[in-house]
Amino acid sequence: MVQLPATASSSALETYEKCPRAYRYQYVERLQTAQSVPALTGDLFHGALEHLFEADPADRTMDLARTLIADQVDAAVADGRLAALEVTGTALENLREDLDQLLVGYFTLEDPTTIDVESVEEWFDLEMENVRFVGRLDRVDREGGGIVIVDYKTGKLPRDGYEDGAFAGLRRYAMLYEHKTGIAPKALRLHYPRFRVTLDRPIAPRSVVVFKQKAEAAWMQIVKAADADDFPKKPGPLCNWCDFQAFCPGEPPADFPRKSR
Ligand code: SF4
């Protein structure tokens, strides 16, 4: 029987859904996944917006946002995250330009001075069967007498017909929010600043209960896989970007970087 981690997250459940073997490598064996420029771009953008929404509403201007983005990039230069990805010189200037375009796109989607924010980047958790489910909610807004759970996506838009799947993570966050506060959010919102698109999904009354049942069912699948030590590989296009492809489905090299416990 495989020892599972004490906590689960939305991204862990998504990893298992995409490929059980990749879940085993990443969350059971705690193998380190490599950082990428798109992922770091998302981190820097989220970091800047986190600080933007910590400011007083009237101060959440484009000028402040540009300063915060510059601070994020400078920090990533100073701590070596960008050099590790060989983002220097022209590539660094391109990244700054890309982040600026994301900001310009974001400001076409909403006016942050008008947003009534309840929390930013706050951790929530929920005890489930043998596991504590945790999630860090990018932003929770008060809007029209209800609560809206908000996230920003700096990558691609979901393909036509697959928009609903893009909300899987936010549905789990709605579950966490309701568990902590006793208040069911009324809607979920995804901003795609690169494409100047916002997707909204209303939440019907009582559907948060269903989100919880689905999360519990997803976790029980992982528990069963651990009991049988059966985390089959699920080959597909994602293998081309998988950090574990070189040895999948076998054992990783002993010196493969691992996350600390
Ligand atoms: S290489 Fe493919 S099958 Fe193997 S763990 Fe990665 S995604 Fe799964």
Image (cartoon, grey):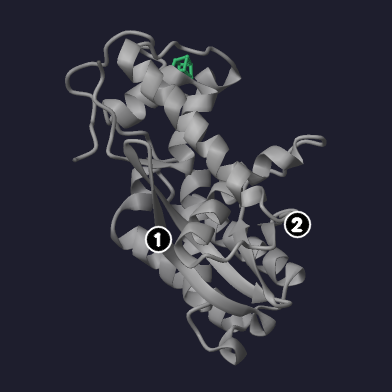
Residue 132: x %, y % from top left: 34, 45
Mark 2 beta carbon near ligand 1 (under 8 Å)? no
Mark 2 and mark 1: Cα distance apart in space: 22 Å
Q: Quadrant of residue 245?
A: top left
184 to 232, vertically: above or below: below
Residue 156: x %, y % from top left: 68, 43
79 to 164, vertically: above or below: below
Name the residue rendered at 48%, 42% in the picture. Answer: 10
Q: Residue furthest right?
A: 160
User: Dot 1: within a 10 Å radius of its alpha carbon, few (fewer than 14), some, or many (20 or more) residues?
Assistant: some
178 to 244, vertically: above or below: below
Residue 191: x %, y % from top left: 68, 58
The secondary structure type at the circle numbered 1 is strand
Name the residue rendered at 42%, 58% in the picture. Answer: 124
Front-lying residue, 108 or 215:
215
Which of pointers 2 and 1 lies earlier in the amino acid sequence?
A: 1
- Left of 246 or right of it: where is 49? right
Front-lying residue, 92 or 127:
127
Q: Amino acid at mark 2?
A: Asp
- Residue for badge 2: 200
Name the residue rendered at 36%, 33% in the picture. Answer: 33
Q: Which mark is residue 143?
A: none
Q: Residue furthest top?
A: 250
48 to 127, vertically: above or below: below
Front-lying residue, 22 or 149:
149
Q: Quadrant of residue 57?
A: bottom right
- Left of 233 or right of it: where is 208? right
- Residue for badge 1: 123
Name the residue rendered at 35%, 29% in the picture. Answer: 26
